[in-house]
Image (cartoon, rainbow, N blue to C red):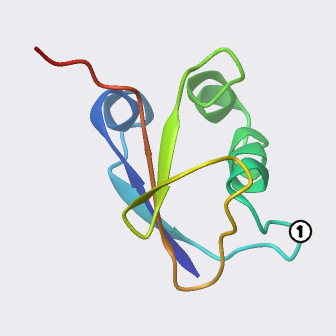
Amino acid sequence: MIKLLYFASLRERLDLAEERLTLPPAVSTVAALLDHLRARGGRWAEVLGPGETLLTAVNQELASPQTPVADGDEVAIFPPVTGG
């Protein structure tokens, strides 16, 4: 099981700050995880869709689509943030 965290506008659009998810056997990377979440359809497909710019972190380290995910990991998904 992994812990998923949603931040900023993602949290608002999904109306969800976090959840726990049992990883299906085919989900072993960040990209596969995002595909799995999009497959839920509806707002998931919209909010996490290919046109959206998203950043991810696995265990509090920035991650790429190829970064592995495994049971016990914490995965954060968030939009890019600008500051000044």
Q: Secondary structure at mark 1?
A: loop
What residue sits 37% from the left and 46% below the top? 16
Residue 81 place in picture, x, y as percent = 29, 25
Q: Nearer the viewer, residue 77 or 14?
A: 77
**Which residue is at the front of the view, 65 or 23?**
65
The residue depicted at 89 percent of the width and 68 percent of the height is: 26
Q: Position of residue 48 (x, y in %)?
A: 61, 31
- The C terminus, quarter of image: top left
| Residue 83 % position (x, y) | 16, 19
Q: Residue at image x 63%, y 48%?
A: 64
Task: Give the mark count.
Answer: 1
Q: Local crowd at mark 1 within 10 Å, few (<14), some, or many (≥20)?
A: few
Query: What residue would you read off at disc 1?
Result: 26
Residue 40 vs 69, above or below: the answer is above
Q: Residue at x 80, y 73 (%)?
A: 24
User: As drawn, is 58 to the left or to the right of 52?
Assistant: left
Left or right for 25, reference 38: right
Q: Quadrant of the N terminus?
A: bottom right
Specify the amino acid type for callout 1.
Ala
Residue 47 image point, x, y percent: 56, 26
Is 74 placed above or below 44 here? below
Quadrant position of residue 51: top right
Q: Nearer the viewer, residue 27 or 44?
A: 27
Residue that extends furthest to the left in the rendered view of this protein: 84
Q: Is residue 55 above or below residue 37?
A: above
Q: Residue furthest right?
A: 26
Relative placement, left or right, of 77 versus 18 is right
Picture quadrant where residue 80 is located: top left
